[in-house]
Amino acid sequence: MSEFLIISCSLNPASVSRRLCKSAFDEMLKTKDAEFIDLAELNLPICDGSSAYGHPAVAPLSNKIRSAKCVLLGIPVYNYAASASAKNMIELTGRAWLDKVVGFVCAAGGKMSYMSVMGLANSLMLDFRCLIIPRFVYAHGESLDQEGKHVPEIQRRIEELAETAGRLTKAINP
Ligand SMILES: Cc1cc2nc3c(=O)[nH]c(=O)nc-3n(C[C@H](O)[C@H](O)[C@H](O)COP(=O)(O)O)c2cc1C
């Protein structure tokens, strides 16, 4: 089990946020023990508040989240909010999130949806006392070059997020 988790929540095979998460993971691995989880590989059920908690993929994921001190979430922005896949994963894993440091790596189509993760951030803060890193990575159409690679400003943001995640996690777990 790793102290730092990166969970990519997109289910799209061509996901942008997954690629950004992999860059964040590479950045974290330079100095930290980290693990990358791709929800597209887990086939999680939809949370029904009942039997879905017994799905075989749920307990291993919950245990990894519970053991981590910091989680970076790769978030596709859908309908001015975090994707249902991200919210569903949090619904399934619930109290495993208690007291985590949480950061966001978002991909959106446009510039205007930059507050989309706030619903999820509020729920993590209020339900589970998570400390939300007040620096997001937010990539949109213009954040990628013609080959689909993210521009240097996004890379700078990813490095800044990884550094801040390490610093805050250390500060609250002396
Ligand atoms: C159902 C759906 C809803 C979307 N809603 C928004 C939106 O509200 N705002 C926005 O900027 N982009 C929106 N987009 C564009 C996605 O945020 C964009 O494709 C992003 O790359 C998704 O992340 P991913 O590539 O990691 O899956 C939407 C895309 C889909 C498929």
Image (tube, rainbow, N blue to C red):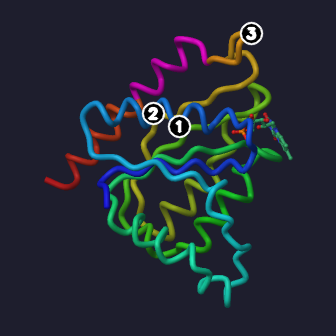
Q: Position of residue 173 (x, y in %)?
A: 19, 55
Helix, strand or loop for disc 1:
helix
CA separation in Å, label 1 and label 3:
20 Å
Q: Which residue is mark 2?
A: 24
59 vs 148, left or right, is left
Q: Which residue is mark 3?
A: 146
Q: Main secondary structure of the magenta part?
A: helix
Residue at x 76%, y 29% (from the top left corner): 112
Q: Quadrant of residue 141?
A: top right
Residue 21 is tagged as: 1
134 vs 121, left or right, is left
| Amino acid at pointer 1 | Cys
- The single residue placed furthest to the left in the displayed view is 174
Residue nearest the viewer, comparing 159 with 34: 34
Residue at x 37%, y 34% (from the top left corner): 162
Residue at x 36%, y 64% (from the top left corner): 99
On screen, residue 120 above or below 139: below
- The single residue placed furthest to the right in the displayed view is 79
Q: Position of residue 138 (x, y in %)?
A: 61, 30
Q: Are marks 1 and 2 in contact (CB under 8 Å)?
A: yes
Helix, strand or loop for disc 2:
helix
Few, some or many residues within 10 Å of mark 1 (<14, 14–19, 20+)? many
Q: Position of residue 40 (x, y in %)?
A: 66, 54
CA separation in Å, label 1 and label 2:
5 Å
Nearest to N terminus: mark 1 or mark 3? 1
| Amino acid at pointer 3 | Gln
173 vs 64, left or right, is left
Q: Is mark 3 within 8 Å of ligand 1?
A: no
Q: Which residues are magenta?
A: 150-160
Query: Which quarter of the figure is the N terminus placed in?
Result: bottom left
Q: Are marks 1 and 3 in contact (CB under 8 Å)?
A: no
